[in-house]
Amino acid sequence: MGGKDVPNVNLGALLGKRLNFITTTLRTRSVDYKADLINQFRAFGAMDALESGEFKPIIDSTYPIE
């Protein structure tokens, strides 16, 4: 989402519907730790799978924002 401010989205309304947003930040982690995560991600082949379209999100349902 790119930060705490999301234009044109009322996150309060979503949270009121008992939705869960599970996220993580690596802000407190060292640069070496972050670099190791990236290297593991690449070694796993995830970057290639994302670029080729092999990894795709599976969307079960969508609902209007209202």
Image (cartoon, rainbow, N blue to C red):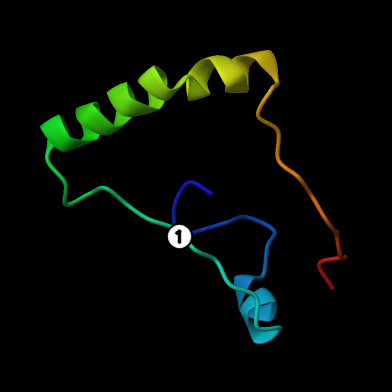
Q: How many labels does the image show?
A: 1
Q: In which quarter of the image is the C terminus?
A: bottom right
- Residue at horizontal 70 percent and vertical 33 percent from the top: 56
> In this view of the protein, which residue sits in the foreground, 23 or 45?
45
Q: Nearer the viewer, residue 27 or 22?
A: 22
Against 4, residue 55 (above or below) is above
Location of residue 19 with respect to 40 vertically, above or below: below
Relative vertical location of residue 21 with respect to residue 46 in this rendering, above or below: below
Using residue 10 as the reference point, say whether residue 48 is left or right of it. Answer: left
Q: Which amino acid does label 1 sit on?
A: Lys
Determine which quarter of the picture holds residue 63: bottom right
Secondary element under disc 1, as helix, strand or loop, is loop
Q: Which residue is drawn at 37% across and 55% down?
A: 24
Asked if residue 18 lies left or right of residue 63, the reply is left
Q: Where is residue 55 in the image (x, y as percent from the top left)?
A: 65, 29
Vertical relation: 16 (above or below) 20: below
**Residue at the spot of label 1:** 4
Q: In this view, does 57 lie to the left or right of 41?
A: right
Where residue 40 sits in the image (x, y, percent)? 32, 27
| Rendered residue at 48%/19% (across/down) | 45
Label 1 CA crowd tier, 10 Å (few <14, some 14–19, many 20+): few
Across and down, in percent, residue 29 comes to 16, 46
> Where is residue 19 drawn, in percent x and y?
65, 75
- Considering depth in this image, is 10 or 60 the residue closer to the camera? 60
